[in-house]
Image (cartoon, rainbow, N blue to C red):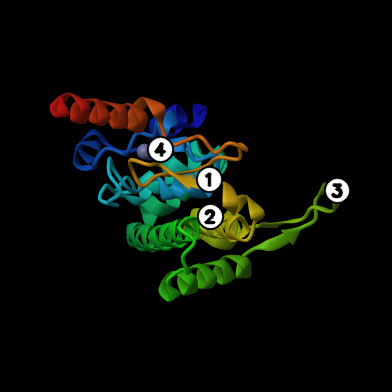
Amino acid sequence: MAWIAWSLSSGFARSKRQRCLVKPMHQWSPRSFIGGHPVLDFLNTGGGDTKARDVERLEAFSDVLTWAAAASVIDATEYTALARLADASPRTGLHCLQEMRIQRESVYNFVTAAIEQKPPAELDLLQIESSARAAISHARLVPGPAHHSKWQVDFSDAQLSLVKFRLDLATSALVTDPAMCHVRQCETCSWLFLDPSATKRRRWCSMAVCGNRAKALRHYHRTRAT
Ligand SMILES: [Zn+2]
């Protein structure tokens, strides 16, 4: 998580007055990365204490960049290049942010439907399909060791859509992978995580937060009933 401190200290060079006018970036903590997969961590940038998706952590495009750096979706050089480009093209950055929020909620709906063994909504399916096609059209197939090749998209090909295209490719890989059967949802909130254990006993995104909240609620109801 060294990226978190780095990304928050070395972003845009702004004057004192500009810094006062700019909303502070969201601060990512280790709890922001409990999903066990970058796509699940991305989905967990939305949603608060309940099942409602009523908390937004990607409030500005700069939040997308600090999150992507902290999640190792982009490296330090890419962060710097993207931050400069976003500073020069704020409207394009805002458009990209809006596209990413729409994509995130479509993937969230698709994944939660799969967990509940329900068919996905047609609109979510089409959104994920079209995003994967767009990302692949900007990617190159890079042969790797042991017959394992991968789709790679670079800053020069994607510009401000780099984070989105990488997540779209990762989403395409995740939803077509048998590992999808290990995706679980927290019993208390909307967050998602991978639980590859045989017992599937993990019930909460975080024992320290949602687990303790559920225990406190059970205790409250028990003491009220007595
Ligand atoms: Zn939770």
First of labels 1, 3 by sequence position: 1
Residue 81 seen by the camera: no
Q: Which residue is mark 3?
A: 146
Mark 4 or mark 3: which comes first in sequence?
4
Amino acid under disc 4: Gly
Tag 3 near tag 2, CB within 8 Å = no
Q: CA distance from mark 1 to mark 3?
A: 24 Å
Q: Is residue 44 left or right of residue 17?
A: right
Residues packed near mark 3 inside 10 Å, few (<14), some (14 to 19) or many (20 plus): few
Q: Secondary structure at mark 1?
A: helix
Q: Residues within 10 Å of mark 4 (few under 14, many from 20)?
A: some
Q: Residue at x 65, y 56 (%)?
A: 177
Residue to which mark 2 is pinned: 167
Q: Is residue 109 left or right of residue 222?
A: right
| Rendered view: 78 above or below 94 | above
Of residues 82 and 111, the one drawn nearer to the viewer in this rendering: 111
* Picture coordinates of residue 65, whole percent (x, y): 43, 45
Residue 169 percent coordinates (x, y): 59, 59
Residue furthest toward the right?
A: 146
Q: Is residue 217 visible?
A: yes
- Along the horizontal axis of the image, is 159 left or right of 62? right
Q: What residue sits right under mark 4 in the picture?
A: 11
Do residues under tags 4 and 3 come within 8 Å of each other at their CB atoms?
no
> Label for residue 38?
1
